[in-house]
Image (cartoon, rainbow, N blue to C red):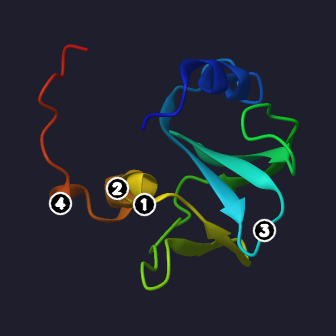
């Protein structure tokens, strides 16, 4: 399930004016707790917190990291987990390909499939 347009637009408010969102996915601090949205642009990975009670209302930037920062790998042993910036995050299985694609774009570009609709 794609991230709703409304959430993407709300997250855009936390980015620079010229930054275009390449990848976006929600995650939860492992073990329960705050919800986050990872927003990947050409220049940075911005992690926006939505707080404990909301998944759709961005509240503040939790951290901004260089685009060359690896997000994954995602461990799928007992759910989908990954470690980022020293914290463990959980995400829905449907977003595993998003994390993999974001990392592949920087670290293994040759593994990405060609864009089937480059004119969009």
Above or below, 61 against 73 in this view is above
Q: Identify the image quadrant of residue 11.
A: top right
Q: Residues within 10 Å of mark 4 (few under 14, many from 20)?
A: few
Q: Within 10 Å of the Cα at label 1, are there few (<14), some (14-19), or many (20+) other Cα atoms? A: few
In the picture as drawn, the residue positioned furthest to the bottom comes out as: 77
Task: Mark 2 vs mark 1: give the one in front.
Answer: 1
What residue did someone put label 1 on? 93
Residue 1 horizontal/vertical position (percent): 42, 38
Q: Earlier in the sequence, mark 2 or mark 4?
A: 2
Kindly indicate whether the residue at mark 3 contacts the one at mark 1 (C-beta within 8 angstroms). no
Identity of the residue drawn at 52% across and 60% down: 68
Image location (x, y in percent) of residue 33? 83, 63
Q: Is residue 79 left or right of residue 115?
A: right
Q: Which mark is residue 111?
A: 4
Q: CA distance from mark 2 to mark 4?
A: 13 Å
Label 4 or label 3, whichever lies nearer to me, is 3
- The quarter of the picture where residue 53 lies is top right
Residue picked out by circle 3: 32
Identify the residue position indicated by label 2 in the image.
Answer: 97
Instruction: Give the quarter of the image for residue 65.
Output: bottom right
Residue 67, can we see it?
Answer: yes
- Residue 8's x, y, as percent? 60, 26
């Amino acid at each position: 399930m794609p991230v709703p347009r409304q959430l993407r637009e709300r997250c855009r408010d936390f980015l620079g004016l010229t930054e275009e969102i390449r990848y976006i996915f929600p995650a939860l601090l492992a073990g329960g707790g705050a919800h986050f949205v990872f927003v990947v642009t050409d220049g940075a990975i911005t992690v926006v917190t939505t707080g404990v009670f909301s998944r759709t209302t961005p509240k503040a930037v939790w951290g901004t990291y260089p685009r060359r920062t690896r997000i994954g790998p995602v461990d799928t042993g007992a759910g989908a987990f990954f470690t980022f910036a020293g914290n463990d995050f959980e995400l829905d299985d449907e977003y595993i390909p998003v994390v993999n694609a974001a990392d592949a774009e920087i670290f293994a570009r040759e593994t990405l499939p060609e864009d089937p609709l480059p004119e969009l």
